[in-house]
Amino acid sequence: MNTTLTDPPEDTQSYHEDLPGDSYDAPPHGGPHDQGAAAGFRSMPHNLDAEKALLGALLVNNRAYEQVAEFLKPEHFAVEQHAKVYQAAEKLIDHGQIADPVTLKRFFENENSLSEIGGPAYLTDLAASAVTVINAREYGRIVYDLYLRRELINLGEDVVNGAYGGDVDETATDQIERAEQALYDLATSGNYEGGFQDFKSSVVAAINSAELAHKRDGGLSGVATDFIDMDALLGGLHASDLVILAGRPSMGKTALATNIAFNVAWNYSRTQGSEGAVVGFFSLEMSAEQLASRILSEQAEIGSDRIRKGMLENEEFTKLVNASTTLHNIPLFIDDTPALTVSALRTRARRLKRRHNLGLIVIDYLQLVSGSSTSRSDGRVQEVSEITRGLKTLAKELEVPVLALSQLSRTVEQRDPPRPQLADLRESGSIEQDADVVMFIYREEYYMERKKPSRRADEDDGKLVERLERWEGALQDIHQVAEVIVAKQRHGPIGNVPMHFNGAFTRFGNLSKDHPYRQRFHGED
């Protein structure tokens, strides 16, 4: 937001006598601003000397533009005339031309706006205020920092006015989340801390990651899921990665995500933090109580249906209580708020990272996350694009893996066999593009159970029995077996992971090495 504080300042003495690096443009003691302050008036943060010195450096040597172009924009200047000069210089330099008082004079004459920036004399005055190219970036940072301060003041006023008024349907929590989103957007716009790093630093980081993998059993550099074949193919869940786990209903997406979350959190509590990670589980579909019941069912090996209906023997209930006592201290945090927005999810994850050193985020599931009101009005595809970009940004910002569940379209079931593919992802373009890893759950047993032979017309009992026996034999071969299809992996190979699945306890596990199903993929004996 550009703020016009004054006409083109022919004389800056009335504004500031201190160094340009000062954060606020306060006059010497006893000046006119002190009298205003006494009356309760405060001017917006600005530093005219820093703006003039930066523009002067740019006009004397256009290489100064290279130092600030990445983060500094015209609207970051406090004085509108300075913003116009910078914008004009930006246009000339971007077109390969020289920007100096002579070319800018011609530019503004063609635009009929020379008088708006104080005339040719002011351009010459700016050039006389030049600093060296070496200092240009530091002066640019001062200008940008003061712009952020002005925006914070404006944002604060909006928050105050919103709290006093606001729509009837808007709660205080909604206002807080909108303010947090505005703060995040402000913090990440034009950030000058990024940019290139030398290759040596990148190589050192890669070696450190390889060393970590070398020291671990199994050679994992990421967070271990405790599923041997999955960890072998993925190398664990890696920091900054967005991992999509997709499947049709009843395939076991939530069960597998819950198993992974529990294993990771359990390892963290068991090893005092040397392995595993603190887990944040955003359950947009199930309540925290339902999710906890699933985990209890898995660990106590008691059917979740029997727990829900209260059909437990005394011994089983005692077993359930003992399992719950064991699970009390695992660092698994559940947020079951429905229809969370990306901004709210980001805020809560950042808070958990700060308080408990969050190491893994699980989201069940992606299609239940809400985008901003703007993206919702642009259509579902744009909304999902915003959500997946936001989750990938969150993974990079917090340097943790984000495991997000996703639904598949019905087209997968029109195939035979109905093995999922990348094209089956709902709004697949953005999900497939932003994800580092895409995995599908496929349980052949689920579909085979629904193919039980029925008597055909004019079929005798012998033929029917024969077909039933073949069906039962095929079903037995795939009983309690699941398959995780890794269809995309940005940093490694794709492949299939055979797994054991116990539907009674909604629990996944490692498939024994001698299981016939493994031979489909590994050819193991």
Image (tube, grey):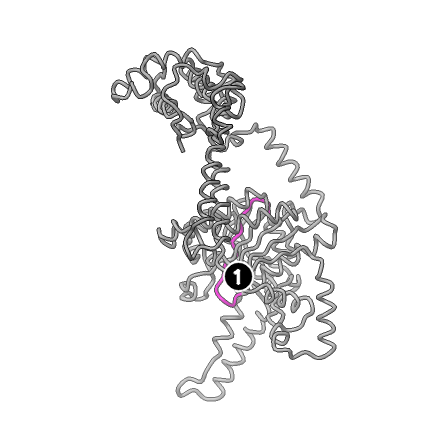
* Label 1 sits on residue: 441
- How dense is the environment of label 1, judged by Cα within 10 Å: few (below 14), some, or many (20 and up)? many
Circle 1 SS class: strand
Relative depth, front residue between 192 and 388:
192
Relative depth, front residue between 4 and 121:
4
Query: In the rendering, at what x and y percent does residue 493 appear?
Result: 54, 48
Query: In the rendering, at what x and y percent does residue 30 appear?
Result: 52, 19
Relative depth, front residue between 158 and 103:
158
Which quadrant is home to the C terminus?
A: bottom right
Residue 124 drawn above or below residue 427: above
Q: At x 70% / y 79%, what residue is drawn?
A: 313
Relative depth, front residue between 31 and 152:
31
Q: Amino acid at mark 1?
A: Ile
Region of the chain picked out in magenta, as a range:
238-251
- State how many labels appear: 1
Q: Is residue 455 left or right of residue 216?
A: left
